[in-house]
Image (tube, coloured by chain):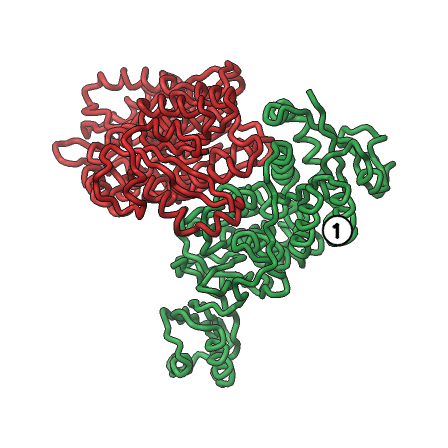
Chain colours: A green, B red
Amino acid sequence: METVKLGILGMGTVASGLVKIIELNNSKISDSIGKKLCVEKVLVRNPNKKRNSGLPQNIYTTDAYEIINDPDIQIIVELIGGIDPAREHIKAALKNKKHIVTANKALIAACGGELEELAAINGAKLMYEASVAGGIPIINTISENLAANEFDQITGIVNGTTNYILTQMTENGLEYEQALKEAQRLGFAESDPSSDVEGDDAVYKIAILASIAFGQEIKIKDIPKEGITKISREDINYARELDYRIKLLASAVKKGNEIEIGVHPTFIPAKHPLSTVKNEFNAVFLKGNAVGELMFYGKGAGSLPTGSAILGDIISILKGGKTGCHKFKKIEKYKITYNAFKPYYIRFEVIDKPGVLGKIADAFGANGISLASVMQRQKNGDNIAPLVFITHAAYRKNIDAALKEINKFECVAKIADIIMVENFE
Amino acid sequence: METVKLGILGMGTVASGLVKIIELNNSKISDSIGKKLCVEKVLVRNPNKKRNSGLPQNIYTTDAYEIINDPDIQIIVELIGGIDPAREHIKAALKNKKHIVTANKALIAACGGELEELAAINGAKLMYEASVAGGIPIINTISENLAANEFDQITGIVNGTTNYILTQMTENGLEYEQALKEAQRLGFAESDPSSDVEGDDAVYKIAILASIAFGQEIKIKDIPKEGITKISREDINYARELDYRIKLLASAVKKGNEIEIGVHPTFIPAKHPLSTVKNEFNAVFLKGNAVGELMFYGKGAGSLPTGSAILGDIISILKGGKTGCHKFKKIEKYKITYNAFKPYYIRFEVIDKPGVLGKIADAFGANGISLASVMQRQKNGDNIAPLVFITHAAYRKNIDAALKEINKFECVAKIADIIMVENFE
């Protein structure tokens, strides 16, 4: 049986998972492609470091070009992460007609179009299923199995760290800081969690998903984002009472010739399938004009799930065909906007005296915002009471205009939080 | 741009959906394959019938061989359903080296292996994504994107009719007969609903899914089945009280060198993702040894979702590569069994007098069955009271032995229902 030689750039968690699956499932994999996979060379920083990969010590190199220029290596798996030097390595490898499989979301979101073009010129393939939602097969599914659809919406819970934190706050009553610490302890959050909790990671992923689904390269700079650091347990509890859950949604919705795209903490109905996505799990929900509503649910990170996605790409490449062709198109069919017309949840802290509710409601009304529901509670102490509204659908600029006015009221101690509501209607 | 000519066998709902999507999304489809799709000929019973397909009248033929022998037709879509004459048409077409796309679950479940072999011999492709779970891309996903996984479990809600009925019974308090009538009115159930409600349809689908996932052809005759006709609103209500939902699950689980496969109404935890799959929606849940738990959710039937799956297959064929190769393998790696060790829900109607509970509990104990919970309620009238048990995990044969004994008790009016419990542990 023919052997296919792989080079791997980087030997972190995901690479270990990949190596482990190749060993564990090698007969299943060979069955599928009629060939045997073999890891030939691995780029590392320190070749003398003791590793548990089971690979022979002489497989490691500190020189990427030993891999990129090796005529025996057909496929290179890039697992360094970040833009440089990953980009330069991939470009050099594509010029050498190596096929590339990568899990690098930052790179694909930033340079997917450029790299795909280079791959096409060189008759090589560039695959990146693992860059979004770990083990969930979403990129190839959108671009292959669902290719006959025009998409109306793609909305995902694509960051496991924030979903873990929000789930713990919802189900176990943890405060944000406690839940973050727990996530760090379990390895679901990094010691510097900012890329996850501030929404950047989700921005990369929705940039990739939306670019592919709508057939137009969408730049990360055009995607507004909001993290979860300001979400309090109070917001979580009000959401529950109102039969909602708070999730960090990365969403792109087509409306006529516009695409509304953004990453935001969002109230979603408790009975929507995305509400059942808990802890470190991810899910991608989409609407196609033929297939209707679909949801894909699974593990969005971890060495084995991500390794599964990488191997799926390797198998696709080896099965041949026009897999992984040009998906990031530099066209301007749609205007990229963020002008959502949605209901909002708004929580105030107000001085507990007669007339406050009416005054605030009037200010909303004067700005064309009508109210769907209101919850007024007993004061907390210090004569300050929470007051919670859910508006009917409105533009954020009108909400902001009303809030600017309301913020001047003496009876309003604080505008504690504003969170979008998505009813999927 | 090159034109690819399609022949369609059958002009029912799904064919109409297919034709509609080809027209509606033709630029998206052409973009994806660099070719234009064109419906060349369609097999019908009555060519003079007025149709709203938008196709010219001279496209229709009553002679399948006008399509099978047409040298210009590259791909034939089989939408007749059932075994014959679909099988003969497909075999003749494969011998003519036509690629085949079919939605025919009965045929693929019965003859998938035979047809794949014939396709391979003739260098043609046989694709059948649409045969299971309508628009949900599950077959190609298992055999391509997830091909690096050994699977431990594949469990689906793969019949929309029964899921609609069970959902209506659960959420709107309908009795089985009412819910069935409503399903028929909405087109979710046929006038003769037996293939759906008796579980046959789900058997075809799990036969296909399990054959592909486990790499071994599994025959429908080896798959035990139980429909939903005996499920009463009482069972539904007890399930809710115990924080479960009742779903018709089609399930295949690998245990060592055995595969436990069957179709049964099942108690599943209310918080499991499959519990959120409502009405006509389908979902497939699977566990791979690399990817972990995955769930795919979407519309399991309907002209446009099924058309989406058919077009996905057509696009795959036209992109080339080793798509759709031999998946039904005639090997005997696993023993096909049904020997589940699971908890059971058992509902009795008993004469309301002291000592009944103890007597029944003793009979369970004597057969090695321990009880997880019991619910005893007030009598219904006639001195008959419901008595509900959930056992700990047990073999069905031990449950049956205990029930045989219990059935002889004078105090037991009726063993009203026995339903398996799946906790996904």
What type is the residue that disc 1 sits on?
A: Arg
Of residues B370 and B140, which is closer to you in this image?
B140
x then y, percent, for residue A280: 57, 46
Say whether residue A119 is visible: yes
From the viewer's perspective, tell me whether residue A76 is left or right of residue B349. right
Chain letter for mark 1: A
Q: Name the residue located 30 percent from the left edge and 43 percent from the top edge.
A: B167
Q: Residue at x 40, y 22 (%)?
A: B92
Where in the figure is residue B69, as x and y percent of width and height? 39, 27
The image quarter in which residue B415 lies: top left
Q: Of B88 and B413, which appears nearest the observer?
A: B88
Residue closest to the eye, A55 or A86: A86
**Place of residue A423 in the rendered image (x, y in percent of width and height, measured from the top left):** 40, 59
Q: Is residue B254 left or right of residue B169?
A: right
Residue for badge 1: A87
| Whole-percent x, y for residue B29 in the image | 48, 47
* Residue B131 shows up from this direction: no
